[in-house]
Amino acid sequence: MNMNMFEQFSSPEFLTIPTILLSMLIPITMTHHKPQLLGNRTTSAMSWLLKIIMLNMTNQLSTNGQKWSRTLTSLLIFILLSNLLGLLPYTFTTTSQLSMNMAMALPLWMATVITGLMKKPSIALAHMLPEGSPTPLVPFMIMIETISILMRPLALGVRLTANITAGHLLMTMVSSAALNLINTNITLSMMTGTLLLLLTALELAVACIQSYVFVLLVVLYLQENT
């Protein structure tokens, strides 16, 4: 049993060199394949998935926003594979690090804001003041709306980090309890192991949902500014 359950979220090292960069490159190497004249089942399934994702995104975006479809699709697949690979034994979950999630959320949020100021400056600035606000509250409303916009990248990064970290911590506690109960109570250990299997299935769903939610929020931010 680990003395500190949060040790699983620290980057593993090889010859005192952190391997987090290698963990980040694994999803990219899994999706990068040489072009082939004839497709197989894997490429057909990937093409079908990409087509559905891009269609769902383009339906919500304007013509200018549809230019982001490839970037958002790549982001979705990258986060999805990172979440799923982190569920394998002896692996490292890169999306459990707030620094990495903020490195994805901050540039994307800033790009949406800059796009809105360039394409529709009047509409982008109009979001700072809700329609029908009382005149004495105008300065406070602008301040509140500005703070809410500045908090968006933090909400993106913290949401993904918190969900992935909480699920892994819960699985660690349940698995440790199941191992400790093997020598004392087999029945209770089997019940705990069953709970662990259910939590694993739940984490598989969370890994898919959180990657979709991350990209969906970026799409909503982009929708406001295009």
Image (cartoon, rainbow, N blue to C red):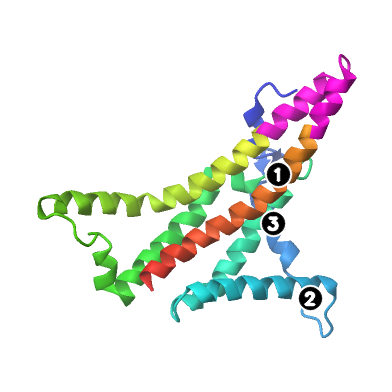
Q: In the structure shown, which secondary structural element does the residue marked by tag 2 occupy?
A: helix
Label pair 1/2, CB-CB below 8 angstroms: no
Residue 138 visible to the viewer:
yes
Magenta region, residue range: 170-194
Q: Residue at x 29, y 67 (%)?
A: 124
Q: Residue at x 74, y 71 (%)?
A: 46
Q: Quadrant of residue 17?
A: top right
Q: In the structure shown, which secondary structural element does the residue marked by tag 3 occupy?
A: helix
Q: Which residue is mark 3?
A: 81
Q: Which residue is mark 2?
A: 44
Mark 3 vs mark 2: give the one in front: 2
Q: Nearer the viewer, residue 121 or 62?
A: 62
Check if residue 143 falls in the magenta segment.
no
What secondary structure is the magenta-colored segment mainly?
Answer: helix
Number of the label disc, if any, that sits on residue 219: none
Q: Earlier in the sequence, mark 1 or mark 3?
A: 3
Q: Which residue is mark 1?
A: 202
Q: Earlier in the sequence, mark 1 or mark 2?
A: 2
Q: Nearer the viewer, residue 30 or 214?
A: 214
State whether residue 68 is above or below residue 200.
below
Residue 12 percent location from the top left of the image? 69, 39
Mark 1 vs mark 2: give the one in front: 1
Q: Amino acid at mark 3?
A: Leu
Q: Nearer the viewer, residue 40 or 49?
A: 49
